[in-house]
Amino acid sequence: MAAVYKSLSKSDKTASKKADGPSNGIKKNRQRVLILSSRGVTYRHRHLLNDLATMLPHGRKDAKFDSKSKLYELNELSELYNCNNCLYLEGRKGLDGYLFLSAVPNGPTCKFHIQNLHTMEELHFTGNCLKGSRPILSFDATFEKEPHLQVIKALFTRTFGVPEGARKSKPFIDHVMGFTVADGKIWIRNYQINEEEQSKVKNAAGEEEIETTEMSLVEIGPRFVLTPIVIQEGSFGGPIIYQNREFVSPNQVRSDLRRGKATRHNARAEQTVARLSRKEDLGLRTKGAQRQPKGDLDTKMMFS
Amino acid sequence: MAKSKLKMALAADKGTDFKKLKEKRQKKAALKRKQAEEGPQDSDDHSGAEDAEVAQISDESDEDEEYEDAEEQINLHGIDESDSSGSEVEMEERLPRKPKTILKPLNAAKPIARPGKAEDADSDEDEDEEDEEDIPISDLEDLDEDEKEDLIPHTRLTINNTSALLTSLNRIALPTDKSVPFATHQVVVSAEATADSIPDIQDDLQRELAFYSQSLAAVREARTKLRAEKVPFSRPKDYFAEMIKEDAHMEKIKAKLVEEATNKKAAAEARKMRDLKKFGKQVQVAKLQERQKVKRETLDKIKNLKRKRSESGNDMGTKEADIFDVGVDKELSKNSTGRSDRAGAGRGSKPNTKRQKKDEKYGFGGKKRHAKSGDFASSSDLSGFSAKAMKAKGGVSKSRPGKSKRKAMSTR
C-alpha cells in the first residue's frame, strides 16, 4: 500500500515540477557547497568551518585537504561530491587564515584574508535559530557599485544563501546574514530575527488588517571580517582579474614590526662603535690608530 | 628610451600622425596668442573674479599643451636619431615637466565601474586607459636621479579587469531582479552604503549599530515581500526542530549570563559598602577634628588668660594662683557648653528622685564588687563604737518600739 502511495505521490510531484519549470522559464536554483580546510589550520578556523557547516544545509563538509600548491585538485573533488561551489579555508603558519570562495566548474575564485574571527561558541550570544533555515542575505549598497564587489556578492549569494527547497532546509525564516563593506573590508554578521507578538488591528473599513509587529535582532555569531585579495577568472586558477592593492599581507606587517624593534639594537651597536673610535682618537689605548707596542714598563712585562 | 618606444607603439596602434598633430598644435597656439592679445581689452569689461577664472583656465590648458608637446618631442627623437643638438636643449628645458605625467596616474581615480553593463567596446577603452595609467618602474629607469626622488614608485600594477569581472559575474550571478520571486534568492541590497553611517571604524558600538540597522531594514523589507508571496515567515510556537546551537550550548550561555549578572550585583554591593565605609570614616574624622578644635580653643583661652593675669597683676604675688584658678573656672563655665553638660548637670541640679533611690539601692558608678566587704579603713573606723553606749542600761534605746508595735503603727 505504501509503495503504491509513494509511486502515486512521486508521479504527482514530477508532474507538478514539469508544469512549474516551463511556466517560470527559470531553471531551479541548485547550489551545493563543498566546505573544507587545508592542513595546519588553528582550532578557531576549524570551529568557524563547523559553524558555517551547520548554517549551510546545502553544504558538504569534507576532510582536510592535504596540498597547498595543487588547489586545482579541489575542482575534481567538488565534482566528485556534486558541488558547484567550494568554500576552502587555508591556514598558513598556524596563524593566518585565507578563505577561497569558488564557483567550481569554471567560475571565478575569490581569495580573502580572514581577520577578527570569533566563532559561535566563544561569543556567548543569546541568539539562536533553526538549523538549516534559509537566511535573508542583507548586502550593503556598496556591493552594487564596483564590479569586483558584484562578483563577490554573487559568490556570497551562491555559498551562503540556502537554495529554496534544499534537502535539509526548514520552511521558516528566522535569521539574517549581514554583509557590509567598510574600511575596504567585508564584515559578516549573523542575526536571529525576533518577532514580538502580533497585534491585529482592524481598519475603519473593517476589511483590511494591519499587523504591527515589533522586530528586533539578536546576534547569533560567528563574526568575521574578510579582506578581498585576488579574484581569479577560473576556478582555483586562471588569470587574475582583480587584485586588491590596499591589502598588506600579515607577513609584511609582522616583518615591519620586527624591523622596527631591530632598529633599536642597531642604534645601540652603532653607539658602541662610535665610543670605541672616540677612545682611539683620545690615544688612550692606541697611537695613531695602531695599538701601542709593549714596552718594558708595560704592566704585563713588569709583573709577569 | 623604453618609455618613448612604448609610447610610440601605442601611438602607432592608435594611428596618430605626429605631423598633423603638430600642425594642429601650432594652430591652437596661434589662436591662443590672438586670444591673449584680445584678453586685456576684455578684462576691462569683465569683473575681477571672472578674470581670475579665465586666467586659471588658460594657465591649465597651457600646461597641458606644453607637456603634451614635450611628449611629442621625445617621441620624435625616438624616431629620427639624427636630430640636431638644438632640440636637445629644448628637451632639457622641458624635461622637468615629465614627472608630472608619471605622477598623474597615481593620483588619478580608478576607472569608474559601470554596473550592469557589459559592453565590449567600452571595456576595450578601459583597458587602454589602464595601460596608460600604469607605467611599470622599468620604464622609468632612464630618468635622472634627482627626478626619481620625486616620484612615488609603485611596484604592483593595478589589476581591475572590468570586462572580465563582468563576464564572470554574468556567468555565476543568480537572478535577483523582479522577474523571479523573492523567495528564490532572499537577497536584499540596502539603499544606502552602511559605511557612510560609520564615522569611526574602530568604534565598536557605532559600527555594530550600523550593521544591525542595515540587517534590520533588510529584514523588514524581506518580510513584506515574503508575506506578499505567501511564504511562511515566522515559526509557529509548536514547531520544534533542531537548532543551530544545541541545548548544551544554550545552557552554557545561560550560565554565563547568570554569572555575569551575579558578578555585577556583587560588584555593586561591594562598591556600596566601600562608599559607606568611606563615609563613616569621614564622620568619625569630623568628630575627632571637632574635639581637637574645642580642646585647642580652651587651651588658647587658658593661655590668653594666663598672659592677661601675668600682665595685669604682677604685684599680686602669692594670691595670684588662687584668683587665677577661680577666674579660669568662671570663664570655662561661661563659654564651654556642650562638653561639660553632663558634669554640670550632675553637680548643679540633682537627678530625679527615682533615679536617686535606684542609685542608692543598686549603686551608681565605680566598682560594684567588694563594696560591702570590710577593709582597712572600715575596720579601723571606730567612730560608731563607744564603751559607754555598750554599757548603757538595756542596751537598746527606747526610741525604737518592738516589732509587733511597729507593725501595728504602720498598718494604722
Image (spheres, coloured by chain):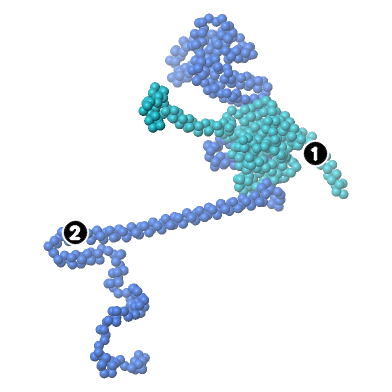
Quarter of the picture containing the C terminus of chain A is: top left
Q: Is residue A48 something that shows in the picture?
A: no
* Residue occupying the point 62% across, 14% down: B10
| Mark 2: few/some/many CA within 10 Å (<14, 14-19, 20+) | few
Q: Is residue B233 left or right of residue B368?
A: right
Could you tell me the amino acid type at mark 2?
A: Arg
A140 or A102: which is nearer to us?
Answer: A102
B231 or A153: which is nearer to us?
Answer: A153
* Residue occupying the point 47% across, 55% down: B272
Among all residues in the image, which is located at the extreme bottom?
Answer: B393
Which chain is blue in the picture?
B
Pointer 1 residue: A17
Q: Is residue A106 something that shows in the picture?
A: yes
The image shows residue A148 at horizontal and vertical percentages of 64, 29
Could you tell me the amino acid type at mark 1?
A: Lys
The image shows residue A102 at horizontal and vertical percentages of 69, 33
The tint chain A carries is cyan
* Residue occupying the point 84% across, 45% down: A6
Tell me the mark number nearer the camera, choosing from 1 and 2: 2
Q: Quadrant of residue A76?
A: top right
* Residue occupying the point 71% across, 37% down: A34
| Secondary structure found at label 1 | helix
A198 or B244: which is nearer to us?
Answer: B244
The image shows residue B171 at horizontal and vertical percentages of 71, 29
Q: Is residue A292 left or right of residue A24?
A: left
| Secondary structure found at label 2 | helix
